[in-house]
Image (cartoon, grey):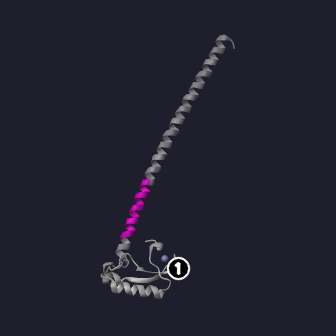
């Protein structure tokens, strides 16, 4: 609910008086007990309302947070072992990937070498052809 729509009181005493009236008139005693007077940060006046939306809810229903579990030596050792296993797997995978890259590089280098060899052969053939032509036609 927006502040402007709420009933407000100029002083805490006025608000407290109103709260007590509400409590005595209320049919829902459980709910009325949750009413509080509070100073409003928005309008700087006093309102009567419920601190929480979950008024009347017994506190016992909210379970206390479980205390942090302290790991045993065995737990820690198991954790370290699992971590090492995972690191090993990651290292193995990295080695595998690097191996793949290296073999692809090697394939590429071999293909490049083959292409260079073919180029050299072609250049030599061309030189031979030119030499023959020069001999035949007296270049
Ligand atoms: Zn207000």
Front residue of 56 and 58: 56
Residue at mark 1: C-beta within 8 A of ligand 1? yes
Relative horizontal placement of residue 66, taking residue 6 as reference (left or right): left
139 is higher (above) or lower (below) than 39? above
Identify residue for label 1.
44
Which element type, helix, strand or loop, lies under badge 1? loop
Relative horizontal placement of residue 20, taking residue 115 as reference (left or right): left
Residue at left 66%, top 11%?
137
121 is higher (above) or lower (below) than 10? above
Relative horizontal placement of residue 109, taking residue 32 as reference (left or right): right
Residue at left 36%, top 70%?
78
In which quadrant will I find the N terminus?
Answer: bottom left
Q: Is residue 89 magenta?
A: yes
- Residue 97 in percent (x, y) is at 45, 50
- Residue 107 in percent (x, y) is at 48, 39
Farthest residue to the right: give it.
Answer: 139
How many numbered marks does the figure carry? 1
Front residue of 115 and 61: 61
Q: Quadrant of residue 7?
A: bottom left
Front residue of 64 and 121: 64
By secondary structure, the bulk of the magenta-drawn segment is best described as helix
Per the rendered image, the range of residues in magenta is: 78-93
Residue at left 55%, top 31%?
117
Q: Quadrant of residue 87?
A: bottom left
- Residue 62 in percent (x, y) is at 33, 78
For label 1, the crowd category at 10 Å Cα-Cα, with few meaning under 14, some 14 to 19 and many 20 or more, is few
In which quadrant will I find the C terminus?
Answer: top right
100 is higher (above) or lower (below) than 46? above
Front residue of 21 and 33: 21
Q: Is residue 18 magenta?
A: no
- Residue 2 in percent (x, y) is at 46, 71
Farthest residue to the top: give it.
Answer: 137
């Amino acid at each position: 609910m927006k502040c402007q729509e709420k009933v407000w009181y100029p002083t805490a005493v006025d608000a407290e008086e109103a709260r007590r009236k509400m409590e005595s008139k209320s049919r829902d005693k459980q709910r009325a007990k949750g009413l509080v007077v509070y100073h409003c940060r928005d309008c700087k006046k006093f309102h009567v309302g419920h601190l929480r939306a979950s008024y009347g809810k017994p506190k016992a229903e909210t379970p206390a947070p479980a205390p942090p579990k302290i790991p045993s030596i065995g737990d820690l050792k198991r954790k370290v072992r699992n971590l090492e296993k995972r690191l090993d797997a990651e290292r193995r995978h990295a080695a595998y990937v690097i191996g793949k890259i290296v073999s692809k590089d090697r394939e590429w280098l071999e293909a490049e070498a083959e292409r260079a060899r073919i180029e050299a052969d072609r250049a030599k053939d061309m030189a031979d052809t030119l030499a023959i032509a020069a001999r035949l036609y007296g270049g």
